[in-house]
Image (spheres, helix red, strand yellow):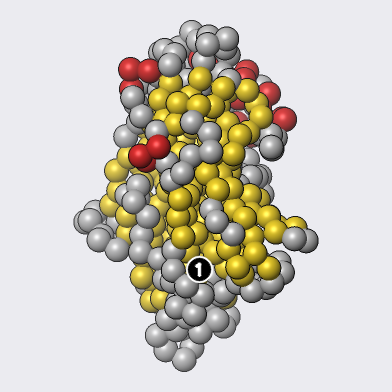
Amino acid sequence: MTSIPRQRLVLVVALVVAALVIAGVGSVITSMNRSGHDDPRASENPKDPPVPVDPIAGETVSTQDLITEVLPNTSTTSPVLRLPPLPMQQGQVMYLRAQMSGRSNIVRTPMFGIRVICLGPGGGAGSIWTVQNHLGQTFGVNTERLRWLFRAPNTTSYTCTMHGVSTTVVDPTVAEFTIDARTTILSATPVTPISTQWFEDIDTCVGAVPIPQIPRCSVARPSVTVLEQTVPTRGARFANLLGDVQLTREYGAFPGGVSTVEVAVRATPVDSGGQGCAPTRTITGRQAITNDLHHIKVTLNLLDVPLNQSPSCGRSLRVDATVTHLAGNPVTIDGPRYSIGIALLR
């Protein structure tokens, strides 16, 4: 059993208490490329993009056999799904995709979260978190997703488990989260070992009105850039880039109302001197965050970015994500343990 980081949990509980006096509904997300036209290769569709499978290592393994059907109101995680043991060579990489869906039995909330832990003899690793507030019992099934790369530290078999948690101060004695077995899944796909991931080191904030008592939001910022990374392409011809940015709408009247942000993931092939040498590819998503939704992760897919198309261009790929505030209260970009960039190289 694992627990949500204590400092984060205290913040979540405090914010949920504040939510009791605030109303709101729903979320909306749209996508377009910078030219304003739909780009079929770039999408924030909940269905994940095609994965460049490593043909030597095998095919996707998945499970929907629930270990736990109902998550009680607690800060301690419970195992939800477990894959069969995965035989892996040292340095081999698995692309883990976790999705948990479920229903709430109370008027709004709980906050529900997931992470994946892969363990074998001699150790293993754990993923980032994804957290989201359920909109309430009248909204039926709500869904959250997590994506992560696991690189085997040793040659052995690893057991990967999705852990889930549900917590709220709204009707705490009766609150529970009933998992929807049809739409809850954990899968592992072997990908090329040159594929890589990176994380955001700090929490940042965007907003038109500062919030003095929250240090990261104490200065008004129209936009911030996160998940900056220069990725060595190691001879790959194409990259699928995944940008998963965890967002939290801050409470209060600063100035209030539904928060709206735009998230853009960009990728530019660069030469040996770090200079752009091919057109920048961009995918954007617009996210509205209400008082009740509060936590949400925006997932963007930038597919089939060409690499190494000439001897001097594309040996590295410069990647980042920009979050721009459009309306409503300030929004925190949750960095450590929550936001991730992934480059699937082939």
Which residue is rendered at x = 53% and y = 34% of the image? 68
Q: Nearer the viewer, residue 167 or 161?
A: 161
Quarter of the image with the N terminus in it: top right
Q: Is residue 70 above or below residue 61?
A: above
* Residue 24 pos. (x, y %): 38, 18
* Number of marks: 1
Which residue is rendered at x = 64% and y = 74% of the image? 89
Quarter of the image with the C terminus in it: bottom left
Which residue is rendered at x = 37% and y = 40% of the image? 183
Residue 243 shows up from this direction: no
Q: Along the horizontal axis of the image, is 78 left or right of 136?
A: right
Which residue is the extreme one toward the right?
122
Q: Secondary structure at mark 1?
A: strand
Q: Nearer the viewer, residue 310 or 45?
A: 45
Q: Is residue 291 above or below residue 221?
A: above
Residue under label 1 = 190
Residue 65 shows up from this direction: yes
* Residue 292 pos. (x, y %): 44, 21
